[in-house]
Image: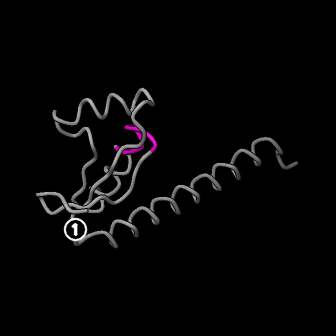
Amino acid sequence: MTDDEGFVEFTRAKNGFEAKLIVSILQEAGIPAHGEGDSLQDEFAMAQALMNTGGQVKVHVAAGRVEDAKKALADAREAGEDLEARFDELQKSEDDPQP
């Protein structure tokens, strides 16, 4: 579905925080993106989502950048997994000091 500004629904976030995180990742990658609640007219929808009464929050990207957006999110997830694994390694080395 395309809106009047040439954006399409890309994904649905669980809540407003997750939507803002996704939008930030996409914008950092140079991909035009916005989530519901980014404008005054969407405040009611965002309030419902934050109170868990309105369901998920839609994230939109520029119509021609959907594949780029998929790659940007996949890269961010991979980086997060790498960071988590590195953190786990550091914790193990602190818990089990070598003689």
Q: Which residues are magenta?
A: 14-19
According to the image, what is the colour scheme of the structure? Answer: one colour
Mark 1: few, some, or many residues within 10 Å (few <14, many ≥20)?
some
Q: From the viewer's side, name the closer residue of 75 and 49.
A: 49
The residue located at (28%, 46%) in the rendering is: 35
Estimate the x, y position of residue 6 in percent, counting from the top left: 15, 63
Residue, x 80% and y 41% (percent of image)? 95
> Residue tagged by mark 1?
63
Q: Is 31 in front, or is 89?
A: 31
Q: Amino acid at mark 1?
A: Ala
Q: Position of residue 82 (x, y in %)?
A: 58, 60
Among the 4 quarters of the image, the one containing residue 53: top left
Residue 3 location in percent, x, y?
A: 17, 57
Q: Quadrant location of residue 54?
A: top left
Question: What residue lies at 21% left-to-right and 64% top-to-bottom?
Answer: 62
What residue is shown at x 11% (from left), y 57% (from top)? 4
